[in-house]
Image (tube, grey):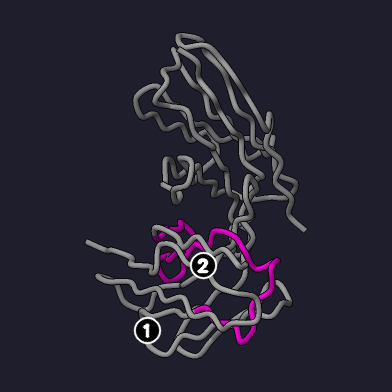
Amino acid sequence: ELKVEQNPLFLSMQEGKNYTIYCNYSTTSDRLYWYRQDPGKSLESLFVLLSNGAVKQEGRLMASLDTKARLSTLHITAAVHDLSATYFCAVDSNYQLIWGAGTKLIIKP
Amino acid sequence: SQTIHQWPATLVQPVGSPLSLECTVEGTSNPNLYWYRQAAGRGLQLLFYSVGIGQISSEVPQNLSASRPQDRQFILSSKKLLLSDSGFYLCAWSYSGGTEAFFGQGTRLTVV
């Protein structure tokens, strides 16, 4: 059974700092997704990573996928308050998505 | 372009009352459809998914049921709500054969 682990589950950081959220999964998969959820809102798709070595960037967020290590990272550069949200990774397993528990990110001014 | 509509946005229901949440997708054919539940401060729990009309797979045994009467319509129901049914319910779709999920705005259900 595929398991997806995110860490940290909670992260409080100052504006302007860099940090990385990690998503580990337990069995082979070459499709991984990152989503953002604002408090009380639905989920918004951020990145789709479809192959080993894939790297996607949008503004201050950059996601990468290493299928051999079964690891994806979401890197935040020079964080700003607007990036405060919960971030989920999800891994494709036989056409079903297996979800991480989410990382709640709070960025303080 | 594709859009997903989910309603109502919020709902307060007494214990033992029935439930019907509806979700429709526009702009695509034969989508995969999903119902998720999210407890407060928690992750996503897949409740049901459907790959076609009348085809429903249940992931979690409970007092909820789902139906897909039309290609782009997905309904979540209960005959008698429990307090533990409270949560944030999310409908989502993906392309047939795909897994990237696109979410509706969600329904916040409070059972009192």
* Quarter of the image where the C terminus of chain B is located: bottom right
Label number found at residue A36 = none
State which quadrant residue A95 falls in.
bottom right
Q: Secondary structure at mark 1?
A: loop
Q: Residues within 10 Å of mark 1 (few under 14, many from 20)?
A: some
Image: A43 above or below A61: below
Q: Residue lying at the far left in this picture: please name it.
A: B1
Which residue bears the numbered disc 2?
B12
State which quadrant residue A19 falls in.
top right
Label number found at residue B71 = 1
Q: Secondary structure at mark 2?
A: strand
Give residue A9's position: percent from left, percent from top.
68, 33
Q: Residue at x 59, y 74 (%)?
A: B14
Q: Is residue B80 left or right of residue A37?
A: right
**Front: mark 2 or 1:** 2
Tell me where the magenta segment starts and ends, as one range.
Answer: B76-104
Q: Is residue A55 left or right of residue B46?
A: left
Q: Nearer the viewer, residue A51 or A39?
A: A39
Give residue B75's position: percent from left, percent from top.
47, 80
Q: Is residue A91 left or right of residue A79?
A: right
- Residue type indicated by callout 2: Val
Asked whether the residues under the numbered discs 2 and 1 touch, taking CB atoms below 8 Å apart as contact, a structural biologist would say: no
Q: Residue lying at the far right in this picture: please name it.
A: A1
| Pointer 2 or 1: first along the chain | 2
